Image (cartoon, helix red, strand yellow):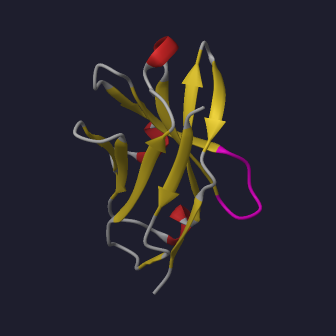
């Protein structure tokens, strides 16, 4: 059973860069065609999809982030990183990584709260 755990900075100042890491354990992410997504939830709001990285390394992002997001992976260990630059207070959210298999989310991380504030 794959488990996901996010870790982040907690507090980031406006205009700076936010980085959140997702570490997988307990199994293969790519088994059964699995791939990882980043999703966030601002306080009091719904879930917002940020982007995805496939086993090939291909990435796709939500247009709403206007090119500010980047997803990278460390091939030496089961870890990927979401980077969001030029952050604004509206980027305050709980950031989740989620494993998708066969068209549905099978595993969620516990989430990492990141607050953007001066």
Q: Which residues are magenta?
A: 42-47
Q: Is residue 77 above or below residue 111?
A: above
Q: Quadrant of residue 73?
A: top left
Question: Within the magenta stretch, is there residue 45?
Answer: yes
Instruction: Residue at 40% x, 76% y: name it.
Output: 14
* Residue 108, percent from left and from top: 63, 41
Residue 58 relative to residue 49: left or right: left
Question: Within the magenta stretch, is there residue 82?
Answer: no
User: Can residue 84 be seen?
Assistant: yes
Please name the predominant secondary structure of the magenta segment in the image.
loop
Q: Is residue 114 above or below residue 5?
A: below
Q: Residue furthest bottom?
A: 118
Q: Quadrant of residue 13?
A: bottom left
Instruction: Residue at 51% x, 37% y: name it.
Output: 26
Which one is nearer the viewer's eye here, 83 or 105?
A: 105
Instruction: Residue at 51% x, 12% y: name it.
Output: 32
Which one is nearer the viewer's eye here, 101 or 76?
A: 76
Q: How many marks?
A: 0
Which one is nearer the viewer's eye here, 95 or 61?
A: 95
The quadrant of the picture occupied by the N terminus is top right
* Residue 16, percent from left and from top: 32, 72
* Residue 12, percent from left and from top: 42, 76
Instruction: Residue at 36% x, 40% y: name it.
Output: 78
Q: Residue furthest right?
A: 44
The quadrant of the picture occupied by the C terminus is bottom left
Residue 65 relative to residue 2: left or right: left
Q: Is residue 8 above or below residue 14?
A: above
* Residue 69, percent from left and from top: 36, 48
Which one is nearer the viewer's eye here, 30 or 94?
A: 30
Q: Residue furthest left?
A: 76
User: Can residue 97 be seen?
Assistant: no
């Amino acid at each position: 059973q794959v488990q996901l755990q996010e870790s982040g900075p907690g507090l980031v100042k406006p205009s700076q860069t936010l980085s959140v890491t997702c570490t997988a354990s307990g199994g293969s992410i790519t088994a059964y065609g699995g791939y990882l997504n980043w999703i966030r939830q601002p306080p009091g709001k719904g879930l917002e999809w940020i982007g995805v990285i496939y086993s090939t390394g291909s990435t796709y992002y939500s247009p709403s982030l206007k090119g500010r997001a980047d997803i990278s992976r460390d091939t030496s260990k089961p870890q990927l990183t979401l980077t969001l630059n030029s952050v604004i207070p509206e980027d305050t959210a709980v950031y989740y990584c989620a494993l998708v298999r066969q068209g549905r989310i099978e595993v969620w991380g516990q989430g990492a709260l990141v607050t953007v504030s001066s």
